Image (tube, rainbow, N blue to C red):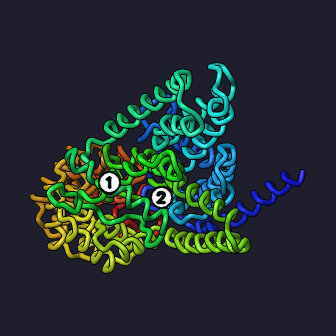
Amino acid sequence: MLKRGRRIWGGALLACVTIAAYLPSLRGGFIWDDNTFLTQNRLIRAPDGLYRFWFTTQAADYFPATYSPLWLEWRLWGMNAAGYHAVNLGLHVITALLLWAVLTRLGIRGAYLAAFVFAVHPVNVESVAWITQRKNLMALLFLLLSVLAFARTVIADGARWRRPPYVLSLALFALAMLSKGSAAMLPIILAGLVAWRRPLRARDLALLAPFFAISAALVITDIWFQKHGSGEVFRNAGPLARLLGAGGVVWFYLSKSLLPLHLLFIYPQWDVRPADPLWWIPLLAAAGLTAVLWRLRRGAARPVLFAWAYFCVALVPVLGFTDVQFMQYSLVADHYCQIALIGVVALVCAGWARWSASAAARWLPGPAAAALVAVLSLLTWRQCGTYASAETIYRATLAGNPSCWLAENNLGNILYGEGRVAEAIGHYEAAIRLKPDLFEAQNDLGLALASTGRYREAIPHFEKAIRIHSDNGAVYYNAATALASLGRLPEALAYFGRSLELTPGFAPAHQDLGATLAQMGRLPEAIGQYREALRINPAYFEAHANLGFALAQLGLLADARAELEAALTIQPASAPVREALARLPRTN
C-alpha cells in the first residue's frame, strides 16, 4: 500500500512540475501552419469531417487518429487556442507518466527520473506549444501504450498469437502510425527490446511480422499523401548528400538532447556538400562509435550500445532520406527528436541510478537530480515564452537564424495585417534578399507597396511573382489593380482577363474589370462584368454601387435606382451612393 501511495504522490509531483514548466504555453496563440492544420481546415469544420478523415484522401496527411479528436475539440474550443494548448499539455503529462511505467516494466533503473527529465526537457516544447504538433504527442502516446502491452507478453515470456495484450499492442501501434509516421521504427525497437532480454527466436520474428507489415503499409500511404498533396520538390539532394546529412543530423540531435541550449523554431538550412571533407566527419564518427560499442557489447558498454542504437533507429524517419515539407526550410527541427530523446534520457538516468547506489556521498545524487530537473524546467519555461504568438516565434527565430527567409516573410505578413506597413515592407525586402525567387514575398511586397500608393514600385514585384508562378491568378489580379491605378488601362484589362482565366468565379476580378472598362467608356461591357460579380456574390457592395452608376449614365434610371438602393442595404452610411441616389430623377 505504501509503495502504491508513493507512486501516486510521485506521479502527482511529476504532473505538477511539468504543468508549471509549460504554463506559459497555455497563453500561446495559433502560429504558422496552425491555420491549414486546424483553424482553416475545411474537414475539421465539416459535419462529416470524421468520415472524410478516415475514408477519403481529402486530408493533407493520412493521420485520422490525430485529426479525429481535433474535429471534436473544434466544436468545444473553436478559435480559442487555450483549449488546444491545454489538451496538448495534458497529453504530454500522460506520456511522461506512461514513459515511467514503460521503463519500470522494462527494468531500466532510474525510470522515474528519466520520465521527469523527459517531461521537462526543453526540446519537447515545440511538440507541446505548437498545436500542429498534436500529431507528435498522439503518436508517442499510442507508441508507449503499444510498448507497454508488448512488454507484458512477448518480451517477458513469448506470446501466443491470440493473446489479448499482443493484439492490443498491435492495434495501438496502428493508431500510433495513424497519428504520425514518426512511429514507423517501432517494430525494430521492439525487436531490440526482446534481444536485450534474450536471443530472438523464430516465434518472436513471426509475432513482429504484422508490426512490420503495418509500418510498411502506412509509410507508403504517408509518402503517397505527401506526393498527392503537393507536387513540389522540397529538397534537391543526391543519395550521398543525404547520407552525409544523416550523419550530421544524428549528432545535432544528440547535442540538443544533452545540452538543450539555443533552441530555434527553424534552424539554419544546411548546405551538405560531399566534396567538402568536413561533411564526412559526422558520418564516420557515428560509424566509428557504433563499431566500438559493438566490439564492447558484452561488457559495460552494452547499455550504451542499446541506447545509441535506439536513438539512431528512432531518428531514421527524419534523417532526410525521404523528404517532408518542413525540410525545405531546415533539415532539423526539435519536434523530430521527441521519440529518440527517450534513449538518451533513459541512459543518463540509469547512469545516475547506478551512481546513486554506489556514491560515497549518498546525499549528493538526490540534490543533483533535483537541480537537473529544476534547470531543465526553467529552460522549458523560457522556451515556452517564444511560442506566445506568431510574432514572438518569428522574432526569436530571426535572432538566432537571420537567414530564415520564411520568418522574414511571415513576420511581414503579421505586421502588414496590423497596419504596420512600413515595418512589413522592410521584412518583405529582407526575405527577397535572402530568397529572390520567393513568390510569396514578391507578391506580398507588391501588395504592401500598392497599399501605400507606390504602384510604380509594386508592379515590378508582381511581374517577378508572375515569372515565378505564372499559373497564379491572384497575382495577375494584384498587378491589374496596380496598373489600373496608374491609368495603364489596356495592360490592366489583359491582366484581369488572365486572372479570370486562372481563377474563374473570382468576383473582385469581375468587379474591378468592370470598373476599368467603365473608365475606358465601355459601359455595356462594364455592366456585364458587374452583373457577373453579383451573380457570384449577390451582397457585393461595390458591384451594386458601380452597376448603379453605370446604368444611370446610360439613362436606365429605374434599374440604376434599384442597384443603388441594394448597395445602401449593404452599406447604409455610404455617402457617394446616397448622393447619386438623390440626384436620380424620379421615374414612373
- Residue 423 position, x and y percent, is 33, 79
Residue at 63%, 69% (x, y): give it.
373
- Which numbered marker is on residue 247? 1
Report whether 460 appears left or right of 66. left
Report whether 392 appears left or right of 234. right
Q: Quadrant of residue 222?
A: top left
Name the mark nearer the viewer: 2 or 1: 1
Q: Nearer the viewer, residue 123 or 418?
A: 123
How many residues crowd mark 1 within 10 Å: few (<14), some (14–19), many (20+)?
Answer: many
Q: Earlier in the sequence, mark 2 or mark 1?
A: 1
How many residues crowd mark 2 within 10 Å: few (<14), some (14–19), many (20+)?
Answer: few
- Residue 112 position, x and y percent, is 69, 57
Q: Nearer the viewer, residue 187 or 437?
A: 187
Residue type, numbered disc 2: Thr
- Residue 533 position, x and y percent, is 32, 49
Residue at 24%, 62% (x, y): give it.
443
Residue under pointer 2: 569
* 188 versus 476 height, above or below: above
* 291 versus 403 height, above or below: above
